[in-house]
Amino acid sequence: MIHHVLSGPPDAPVLVLGNSLGTTTALWDAQLPVFERDFRVLRYDHRGHGGSAPATGPFRLDDLAEDVLELLDHLGFARVSYCGVSLGGMVGMWLAGHAPERVDRLGLVCTTAVFPTARPWLERAATVRAHGTASIAAQVVSRWFTPGHPTAAHEAGLSTVDDESYAGCCEALAALDLRPVLPAIEAPTVLVAGRHDLATPPESLRAIADVVPGAALHVVEAAHLANVEAADDVTGILHDHLVGR
């Protein structure tokens, strides 16, 4: 069972928050005070991240999404809203497309349904297996934020992720193609792109919004971890969507 944290009113509707690759439940700290007003918030860590046990790759996105379904079943949550950043957003699209009865509302931040090529992810997996996550931390985190944003804590956090688990997640991203399931998403969906995001640029989210029925796209002044760098804007967009405004 992957590591998870529950907070907020016990009888409120459940909101699941999924993290980006290389981060933990702390990724959502800025959003918690607002989300916990209206939701029972469930945060979780991907395999080998934070408090979740290491696992041996390669993985597919299906495996990471099924970890979440297993967690929801364990906790007795039949239907939830879901917000995810990057890899967490990909898990959210998989869940909403493959198990639409489980997802009420969907929020996707700085994510994509497919990458142009698998090669960078396979190369990163090989580097991490050979030299560890610490060897890539500075380069990877530099792309998470616009210049001048503090990165030391995020680099330290990425360096603690289990090497094999991280490499396995990279292989899941290398094989990613969620385009076939996007038209099956029934949950009302909002997308947030970072205008300066090099990893999943706004056009990646526009491609999703164009296919998911009724989806709305917002662009904020941030790079890849927009919910950290533009926390107030992203919190407001997601919260308004989740409560049906």
Image (spheres, rainbow, N blue to C red):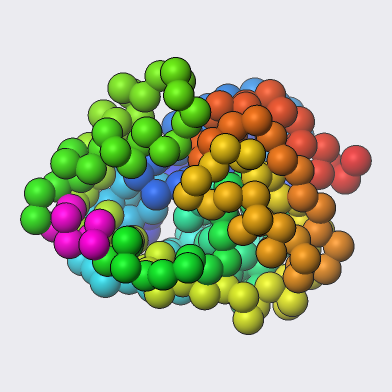
Q: Is residue 151 above or below residue 79?
A: above
Q: Quadrant of residue 179?
A: bottom right
Q: Residue at x 57, y 37 (%)?
A: 196
Q: What percent of the width, then of the height, locates residue 224?
A: 51, 40
- Residue at the spot 16% in from the left edge and 41% down from the top edge: 135
Q: How many marks?
A: 0
Residue 1 visible in image:
yes
Q: Position of residue 116 (x, y in %)?
A: 47, 68
Question: Farthest left residue?
Answer: 130
Quadrant where the N terminus is found in the figure: bottom left
Left or right for 243, reference 206 = right
Point 53% across, 68% down: residue: 114
Vertical placement of residue 24 versus 229, above or below: below
* Residue 150, picture quadrant: top left
Q: Position of residue 46 (x, y in %)?
A: 38, 53
When the figure is inspected, residue 42 is found, relative to residue 216, above or below; the finding is: above
Residue at 53% from the left image edge and 62% from the top image edge: 91
Residue in the foreground of this view, choosing between 230 and 19:
230
Magenta region, mostly helix, strand or loop? helix
Q: Residue furthest right?
A: 245
- Give the percent coordinates (x, y) of residue 139: 29, 38
56 is within the stretch colored magenta? no
In this orientation, which residue lies closer to the viewer: 63 or 122? 122
Vertical relation: 12 (above or below) 93: above
Point out the image quarter for the C terminus.
top right
Q: Tell me which segment is drawn in magenta.
A: 123-129
